[in-house]
Amino acid sequence: MHRGVDLKSSRAWDVIVVGAGHNGLTAGALLAKAGLSTLVVERRDIVGGCCVTEEIAPGCRASTTSYIASMLLPQVIRALDLGAHGLRMVPCEPALQVALEGGEVLAAWNDPARTAAEIARFSARDARAYRMLDDELRGLASRLQPLFVEMPPDTRATGVRRWSELLRAGRRLRGMGGRDIEGLTSFLTGSLGELADARFESHAAKSLLLANNLYGKHGGPYTPGTLSGLLFHLLTGGEEEVQGFFGHVMGGMGSITSAMAAAGRSHGMEIRTGAGVASILVDGGRARGVVLEDGTELAAGTVVSGADPKRTFLGLVDKQALPEDFVAAVAAIKMDGPCAKVNLVLDAEPVVHGMPADAGPGRRALFTLPPEMHVADRCYDRSKRGELADADELFLDCVVASNVDDSLAPPGRHVMTVFVQYVPYRLAHGTWDTERDTLGDRVIERISRYAPNVPGSVVARQVLTPLDLERTYGLTEGNIFHGDVRPDQLFHMRPVAGWAGYRTPIRDLYLCSAGTHPGGGVTGAPGYNAARRILADRKARR
């Protein structure tokens, strides 16, 4: 018997959403907009999940986890009118840039011709190869884009529906030539390193490709499947549906989820923070509500989990209510997140070797430090063995967000976030509680070789290891994608084969997390798609 409110006498919500991350908020707001009484319950005291802005020193705020807006769906922005609720994004210009050994900086601008001209400083041949590759990628990305908001095919369908599912899936191949299909297959399964070696000759151009990798994904650059990042980063984002959009969010990434929460509230959605869910109630094969960590029971006709599949089915749901093969499949999802985050407050802006004297604040706001391809591969291999890489092996992506948004820090202070890969979730020696500072020290040591003034400018430092990402943000094994982005865990295989349509083996329990199609990143797509599935199912029942 659960403590708390008697389900028979308490209010029954139409929908309870578990977790106020950006996907949970998207799903909840859309369901509330459709007229359903919707409650979002969140374990932390703030909304946002991993899309948050938090104070890391007095008066200094950082996007502590996710830090650049790239693929936020235009459909989500428009459906929830996020601009009216305070969302403002400024395009990153350049979209990214690498600081090279020897004191030079190479930028990838939003204009491919301008980027090619930069590459030509190092190799005319590579400049031509870049333009050809960019054209190829943009064409393939436009083919891939519609799949983000389509329901994956039900591969377990039978009878007439089986054929309709196959026809629906095949519709996207209509009009694609053999070369298109070949290209899509290569870019979804091939390795970044092999493509770079085959098409480019200069270290500079290869570094730029590596800097555009899919951060947080398993695999060194020579691992099959690592080429997919070039495609994913060219999907559209922002209200104007710009291919390859990268944006600084004014007020930090938390402004996205604050706008989503405000949009949901405008439609009657309620949010309770400090309300962690202990379990999802299941009776007679149906979800009936949730039990909070304080014992309170909340009833609902539909429960939507924004938690990752492992946390949902191996932690919140009684395994006896699930098929054994389903539980085994969920347990086998590849997680063990390979990344960390270091957030810094500085009393001086980083001075990067080779940064042009006339570089504006937008250009000075970001720089990536990718190691050479073979070194990045070695770094990943070490992380698989539970080893922490040396400073010169670490792959860092640095953003000085306060350069473009002075609301994040007071005068004289600068906020810099550093994404780190590859690091192990499980250390072979020691624990993250004892090695956290070692990672932070090595990150600063690597940055110092390109921006020597940084070590002496650090006023405050926050190091978020994979274990911290799990403990604080609820990411099982610290995986920012709620399950690795790899061919056997995508589309109709996400989260597991046979259950890729946001439904689950428990009736009226749905998933809306990044562990579902189309995966991670601050896209809102899983929440958007899950809400449409729920509304379609309700309509079909009527």
Image (spheres, rainbow, N blue to C red):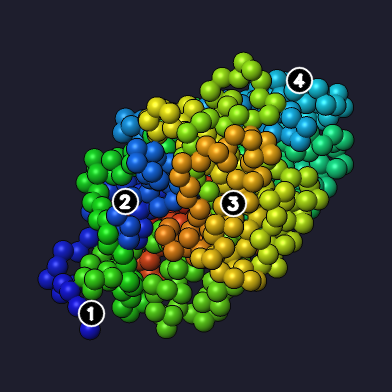
Q: CA distance from mark 2 to mark 1?
A: 26 Å
Q: Which mark is residue 117?
A: 4
**Which quarter of the picture shows residue 450?**
top right
Task: Kindly identify the amino acid type of the residue bearing the numbered disc 2.
Answer: Ile
Cβ–Cβ below 8 Å for labels 2 and 3?
Answer: no
Which of pointers 4 and 3 lies earlier in the amino acid sequence? 4
Q: CA distance from mark 2 to mark 4?
A: 45 Å
Task: Kindly identify the amino acid type of the residue bearing the numbered disc 4.
Answer: Ala
Q: Residue at x 14, y 68 (%)?
A: 10
Q: Residues within 10 Å of mark 1 (few under 14, many from 20)?
A: few
Q: Which residue is mark 1?
A: 2
Residue 102 placement (x, y as % from top left): 78, 32
Circle 4: element type: helix
Q: Which mark is residue 441?
A: 3
Circle 2: element type: loop
Q: CA distance from mark 2 to mark 3?
A: 29 Å
Kindly report which numbered mark, 4 or 3, lies closer to the viewer in this rendering.
3
* Residue 366 to residue 190: above or below: above
